Each structure stands twice: as structure tokens, then as C-alpha cells.
Image (cartoon, helix red, strand yellow):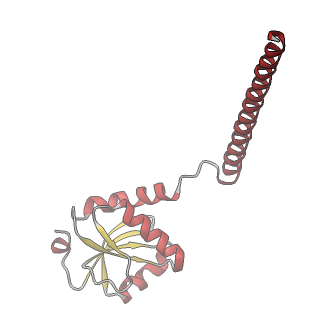
Amino acid sequence: MREHLGGRDSMKVERRTYLQAGARGIILGATLFNLFVCLRHELYHYIHYGNRLDEVVINAKRMSAVRADLPRRGIVGYLSDRRGEDADHECTRTQYNLIPIIVSCSPSSTEPIVIGDFRKPTTAAEIYRARKLTPLRDYGNGVMLLVGGGSSSESALR
């Protein structure tokens, strides 16, 4: 009778070993599959985008010079030649990069200091003139600091 129980116990141990090996195999297979998917994604990104910087990083670099000329706190306006969702994304990136300064993305903003963010320098002048803004500084790459409403440059930046 003991031999019979011993045989059943050894079958349980043998079955448990197979189940553990199967579970390890499933985990290993899932891990390898996940690794393959990640590598494929990175390869796709590298082939299509190369070493280009992320748009958030690019915007941070463009806005770093403006930050030095802005007051430490306060509200500034935002003006762009972009339209729709593209304009919203770019303004949100600018808000993020200039924290704690509040950037008003509203086109009807009447702030004395306005950040101009233009893709086409040829259209920039007509856009800020239509809003009765005057360029205070041009940082290049489409980024400008504008003042409006008869504000002098020194009083606007305080």
C-alpha cells in the first residue's frame, strides 16, 4: 500500500514539475515576444525619424532665450501663424516650457507682453501689426517677444 501512495506522490511531483516548466516557458515566450515588439518599434522609429529631437525638446530650446527676458511670474500672451490643432499643441508646449509664467493661448488675449511663434517670417509682420503689437526682440527661428497696447519695453518686462 505504501508503494501505491508513493507512486501517486511521485506523479504529483512529476506533474507539478511539468506545470512549473510550462509556466516558465510561457513567461519566457511572452518576455521574448515583448522584447521583439519593443525592438521592432525602436527600429521603425529610427528608420523613419532618425536622430531627430522630440518636438518638446525642440520647443524648449527655442523658448529658452525668451525665458531669460520674461518676468519671473505673470501672464503673457501667445501669437502664432499656426492654425487649429497644430497651434493648440505648440501653445501647450510653450506653456509647459515657460512654467511658472502663465501663457494665454487665447487669440483675444490683451496681455502687454506677447510671445510670437511663427513658422513663416514673411507672415509674422502682418500678423503682429494687425494686433497692434511691436517687436521688442527677435530670437530667430520664428520666435519673437512682442509688446502691445502702447507699453514701453521696460515697463512691460517688469
Q: Is residue 44 visible?
A: yes
Occupied quadrant, residue 142? bottom left
Asked if residue 120 shows in the view, the reply is no
Which residue occupies 76% across, 20% down?
13
- In the image, taking residue 65 as reference, residue 32 lies left or right, namely right
Measured from the top left, where is residue 148 in percent x and y? 26, 82
Residue nearer the viewer, 24 or 51: 24
Q: Nearer the viewer, residue 50 or 125?
A: 50
Q: Position of residue 136 (x, y in %)?
A: 28, 72
Q: Residue at x 69, y 54 (%)?
A: 48
Count of all numbered marks drawn on residues in the image: 0
Q: Measured along the vertical axis of the image, is residue 53 above or below residue 141?
A: above
**Residue 7 at x, y percent in the picture:** 83, 15
Q: From the viewer's side, name the closer residue of 20 and 8.
A: 8
**Residue displayed at 76% across by 29% down:** 19
Q: Residue 27 or 136: which is nearer the viewer?
A: 27
Res. 74 image quadrant: bottom left
33 shown above or below 58: above
In the picture, the quarter occupied by the N terminus is top right
* The image quarter in which residue 23 lies: top right
The residue depicted at 45 percent of the width and 64 percent of the height is 141
Left or right of residue 143, residue 7 in this image: right
Left or right: residue 150 compared with residue 51: left
| Quarter containing the C terminus | bottom left
Question: From this viewpoint, which residue is outermost toward the front?
Answer: 1
Whether 155 is drawn above or below 49: the answer is below
Q: Position of residue 102 (x, y in %)?
A: 30, 69
Q: Is residue 22 left or right of residue 58?
A: right
Q: Residue 79, relative to residue 43: is it above or below?
A: below
